Image: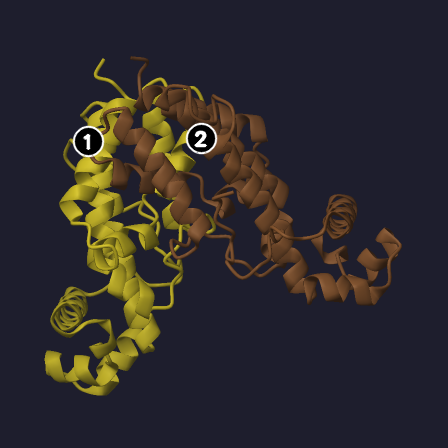
Chain colours: A brown, B yellow
């Protein structure tokens, strides 16, 4: 997979990982996700994960190194999945649809990705801002730039930056949790923005 | 003037200020702006200002309280001027032009405002981000919302938020100073965005 992890040194599943180790890893990550979904990211401690997954605490530490490592692995996995979707997945997010439809699907996917991972982003201490030194943000920006060029935008690089900021994770999280705007209003407005920006050919 | 200062407790020129006092204040602020323009915001100290304006240091302290107070006054003055422009000034920024033309002029004005005041914004320790608890940001957002509603956007509140983030001060400053994008490219791209978003009636 050519996806770029949030931090290149976080193991994404080495190619020669034995399948039982891979299964164990998946089981731990799935338990970790359940903990976050149920009790929030603060509840995700190494102890809680060991308990939830019925393994020893040593196993959890050997696997992820630290609580921060665990969180980065969770984030990196989600980010990779989303990246894989827009680069290689089925249309309209992936190749095969018109640039306009792909951009609409990209923004919708991004909004839900941020809302699902916002807790984790904050807790992991990762910048929730659009930092352009983060490889995942660069890749997203580049993806939008290519689609905007395909759709005839005069300065696709600068327009992609405007759209990246419109999808700022902090903005999305604050809109929903502080300003009480529903996720559907966000995705509807994104659709209106792209539909008007790139009229149907 | 109904403009909202960045910090309500910063004096914007009280109504009963005597005219010689007002002139002195204006002279000090003008000298302060010259210092920032010539040597950057770091050079703006109370000493340097007193020296530049040929007054005693005590006068500068009595007028602005502290270096931070001086910076907030400078910022607040610029912000008020820009606010006055879009609320009461001549078209296309002010009333009298179509929503589309007013939004184009607003973004252009905002980009130059940020570039002129970026140094000061950083040095004053003011958040260079679009914090929605800052009255000036709320007013800008509301202004865009009204214009977007006038132009027939389905959810003007959420769209105004997207456009506010596209004009994020940190984005504008980084585009120009870090990524080497010219201010003209930024304003051209803003014009393309609004022109496509709100086709001519």
Callouts 1 and 2 close, C-beta under 8 Å: no
Q: Which residue is drawn at 44% across and 23% down?
A: A191
Q: Which of A86 and A184 is in front in this view?
A: A86
Give the Cα separation between the discs numbered 1 and 2. 27 Å
Label 1 lies in what chain?
A
In the picture, the disc for residue B135 is none
Alpha-carbon neighbours of circle 2 within 10 Å: few (<14), some, or many (≥20)?
some
Residue linked to disc 2: B157
Q: Which of A18 and B80 is in front in this view?
A: A18
Quadrant (top left, top right, bottom left, bottom right) of the C terminus of chain A? top left
Q: Position of residue A188 (x, y in %)?
A: 49, 23
Q: Is residue A83 above or below residue A36?
A: above
In the picture, the disc for residue A154 is 1
Q: Which residue is drawn at 68% across and 67% down?
A: A65
Query: From the viewer's perspective, is the residue at label 1 or at label 2 nearer?
Result: 1
Q: Position of residue A98 (x, y in %)?
A: 37, 19
Q: In this view, does B121 lie above or below A101?
A: below
Label 2 lies in what chain?
B
User: In the picture, residue B106 is in which quadrant?
Assistant: top left
User: In the picture, residue B85 is in which quadrant?
Assistant: top left
Q: Is mark 2 on a helix, strand or loop?
A: helix
Q: Is mark 1 on a helix, strand or loop?
A: loop
């Amino acid at each position: 997979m050519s996806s770029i992890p949030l931090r290149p040194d976080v193991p994404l599943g080495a190619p020669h990982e034995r399948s039982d180790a891979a299964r164990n890893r998946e089981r731990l990550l799935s338990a970790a996700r359940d903990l976050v979904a149920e009790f929030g990211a603060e509840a995700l401690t190494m102890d809680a994960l060991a308990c939830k997954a019925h393994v020893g605490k040593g196993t959890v530490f050997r696997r992820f190194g630290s609580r921060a490592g665990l969180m980065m692995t969770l984030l990196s996995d989600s980010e990779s999945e989303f990246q894989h979707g827009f680069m290689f997945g089925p249309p309209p997010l992936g190749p095969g649809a018109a640039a306009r439809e792909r951009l609409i699907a990209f923004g919708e996917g991004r909004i839900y990705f941020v809302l699902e991972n916002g807790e984790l982003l904050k807790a992991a201490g990762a910048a929730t801002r659009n930092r352009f030194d983060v490889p995942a943000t660069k890749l997203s920006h580049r993806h939008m730039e290519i689609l905007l060029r395909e759709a005839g935008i005069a300065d696709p690089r600068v327009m992609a930056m405007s759209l990246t900021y419109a999808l700022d994770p902090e903005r999305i999280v604050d809109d929903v949790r502080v300003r009480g705007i529903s996720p559907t209003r966000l995705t509807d407005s994104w659709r209106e923005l792209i539909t008007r920006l790139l009229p149907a050919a």
